[in-house]
Image (cartoon, grey):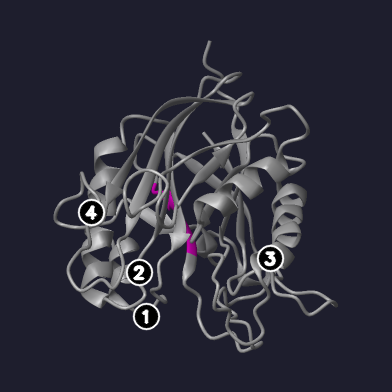
Amino acid sequence: MKSKAPLKIRLLTHNIRYATNSPFKGEKPWEVRKPRMINELRFNTAHCAESFICLQEVLHGQLIDIVSGLNPTDTEEWKYIGVGRDDGHEAGEYSPILYRPAIWQLLEWKTIWLSPTPDKPSKGWDAACIRILTVGIFQHHESKKKVVAMCTHLDHAGPKSRVEAAKIILKQTAEYKNEANGIFLAGDFNSPPDTEAYKLMTSDASLMFDLRSEVPEEERYGHDLTYSGFQDKPDHRIDFLFLEKGTDTKTPWVVNGYAVLENRFEDKIYNSDHRAVVGDVELS
């Protein structure tokens, strides 16, 4: 029987910075950053079993490290959906979605390439890199509520590709709007709020809204900007959590909190050049 009680969920998105062999000034190797990243994800999802973790810039080895690090010995507390963007298997960066299978049943999932040929690995328009959208439909075991989860990472160089990618994503949200109690989208959009891709995502015609907008400024926790770099010179808010808007007949989400977490502490080691964004929500 489907429960009518709201379902509390924590959403966390973080661009973890891929494991490069040519680190920037101030950047430590992945082996140094890895335990700090895993600890961040574990701590910030420990007390909400319904949490989803959405990551960007994740190479296959990093993904295995994170899932292994989050899972106690000989268990599968956490699983993931997603593929490497370069070949649809393990090559290139993932935009994975992590979930607890004891809490959520995965009903279906897919990867969409953000290009004119979305069914195969491909680069779109003026993009410097191949870009993808990961989509999963999950059903909560206990309440039977369904959620559509989406995770993406838009191009850093091509403004046209970001706009066209946003159009593809919004088309997907429209196609899924009757498939679940609510839709959420997480990711690094490389698009501050004053740029066209973000404006498209939050326009009156869009089915989505920026979670942060529902939390009064005085109630937000942590930083405002989400991109810090490795030189303590934060300059952008480009990482977002978007939620499906309500209608006269459907109110998918209630927003309870918003935070941008710290990514460096007294040891002066950045776990990434981005900061994690966290949203506490209730699914109707």
Q: Residue at x 67, y 84 (%)?
A: 26
Closer to us: 13 or 173:
13
Q: Mark 3 points at which residue?
A: 219
146 drawn magenta: no
Mark sitting earlier along the chain (3/2): 2
Mark sitting earlier along the chain (2/4): 4
Residue 123 lies in what quarter of the image?
bottom left
- Going by the numbered disc 4, the residue's amino acid type is Ile
- Going by the numbered disc 2, the residue's amino acid type is Tyr
Q: Mark 2 points at which residue?
A: 198
- CA gap between label 3 and label 4 equals 33 Å
Q: Give x and y (percent) for residue 55.
A: 53, 54
**Image height of 139 relative to 246, above or below:** above
Mark 2–mark 4 contact, CB under 8 Å?
A: no
Q: Residue at x 56, y 41 (%)?
A: 98
Q: Which residue is drawn at 60% across and 66% down?
A: 216
**Image height of 163 relative to 211, above or below:** below
Labels 2, 4: front one = 4
Q: Name the residue under label 4.
A: 168
Q: Give x and y (percent) for residue 201.
A: 32, 62
- CA gap between label 4 and label 1 equals 20 Å
Labels 1, 3: front one = 1
Q: Mark 1 points at which residue?
A: 194
Mark 1–mark 2 contact, CB under 8 Å?
A: yes
Closer to us: 21 or 25:
21
- Going by the numbered disc 3, the residue's amino acid type is Glu
Mark sitting earlier along the chain (3/4): 4
> Magenta residues, as a range?
240-245
Labels 4, 1: front one = 4
The answer to whether 205 appears left or right of 282 in the picture is left
